[in-house]
Image (cartoon, rainbow, N blue to C red):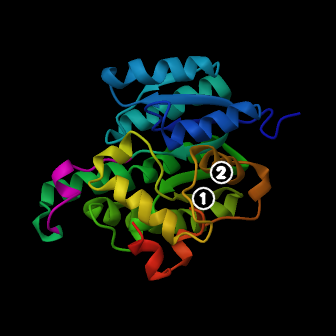
């Protein structure tokens, strides 16, 4: 018997095999979950469809999360195919490259609105339209990062977006808790993904994070996937409104031994 046998849900944001969303999907599927997938556009479909098909997905849908009508339609399709759902995973984020580097004060209003809309606000319509078809005990999980609460070089606009996302998680947890639905965020440490390539100086970030973390290493995609499984499954039935860190303890350390950093 798998931990997720009989459980059905949807993941927004799987984009390739070397991403956090896919790592979570793999763990869920291995434990028996039935997963629906979305892709942002026709270009992304060629990446997402093979992943979804490898997990025997019954539903693979195009969804631009900035189009609320389309988000609503996706959940209508889920209702037709699955009836009720047990989990929703929000793994969608975007900011213009120029808003991830340089001076924070140079971020444009257009870039601000885009990043907040795609990366944070999109969780709200997912919760709104998913709510009627979520089973009691269901889970909504969003992906975040430490840059939401600490200033991280070359993260800039995305840090603000993740802060808004985490705050939204808490308010949605308060609302959804009344009907037995949990809402949490998963904050992974730096890990090599295709998305991480958009962050300037990421290789240096990996080295510093490993030196700073109590476990003296970086987290793996498999470990992040397992933490996602925990938040989605009944193992975390008493957990909601939380930001769960899986970063080898990096978030708990303000300053490590100087010689550890200076050694390289």
Q: Where is residue 70 in the image (x, y as percent from the top left)?
A: 38, 33
Do residues under tags 2 and 1 come within 8 Å of each other at their CB atoms?
yes
Comparing 168 with 216, the one in front is: 216
Q: Name the residue under label 1.
A: 183
Is 100 contained in the magenta span? yes
* Label 2 to label 1: alpha-carbon separation: 6 Å
Query: Is 210 left or right of 119, judged from the image as shown?
Result: right
**In this picture, is 174 found above or below 182?**
below
Give the structural element (helix, strand or loop) at label 2: strand
Q: Mark 2 points at which residue?
A: 139
| Lower position in the chain sequence, tag 2 or tag 1 | 2
**Secondary structure character of the magenta stretch overall:** loop
Q: Quadrant of the N terminus?
A: top right
**In this picture, is 105 found above or below 133?**
below
Looking at the rendering, the stretch of residues picked out in magenta corresponds to 93-103
Comparing 163 with 151, the one in front is: 151
Using the rendered image of the protein, determine whether residue 149 is visible from the camera's viewpoint.
no
Is 247 contained in the magenta span? no
Using the rendered image of the protein, determine whether residue 40 is visible from the camera's viewpoint.
yes
């Amino acid at each position: 018997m798998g931990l997720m046998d009989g459980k059905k849900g949807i993941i927004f944001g799987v984009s390739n095999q070397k991403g956090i969303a896919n790592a979570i999907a793999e763990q869920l599927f291995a434990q028996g979950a039935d997963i629906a997938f979305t892709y942002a556009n026709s270009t992304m479909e060629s990446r997402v469809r093979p992943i979804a098909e490898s997990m025997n997905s019954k539903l693979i849908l195009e969804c631009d999360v900035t189009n609320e009508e389309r988000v609503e339609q996706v959940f209508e399709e889920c209702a037709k195919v699955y009836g009720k759902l047990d989990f929703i995973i929000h793994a969608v984020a975007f900011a213009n490259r120029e808003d991830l580097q340089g001076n924070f004060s140079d971020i444009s209003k257009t870039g601000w609105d885009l990043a907040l809309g795609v990366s944070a606000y999109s969780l709200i319509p997912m919760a709104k339209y998913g709510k009627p078809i979520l089973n009691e005990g269901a889970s909504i999980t969003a992906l975040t990062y430490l840059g939401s609460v600490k200033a991280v070089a070359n993260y800039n606009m995305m840090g603000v977006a993740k802060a808004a996302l985490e705050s939204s998680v808490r308010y949605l947890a308060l609302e959804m808790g009344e009907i037995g639905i949990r809402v949490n965020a998963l904050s992974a440490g730096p890990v090599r993904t295709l998305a991480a390539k958009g962050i300037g100086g990421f290789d240096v970030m990996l080295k510093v994070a490993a030196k700073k973390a109590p476990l003296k290493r970086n987290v793996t995609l498999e470990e992040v996937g397992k933490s996602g499984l925990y938040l989605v499954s009944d193992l975390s039935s008493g957990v909601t409104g939380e930001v769960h860190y899986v970063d080898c303890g990096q978030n708990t350390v303000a300053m490590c031994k100087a010689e550890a950093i200076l050694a390289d």
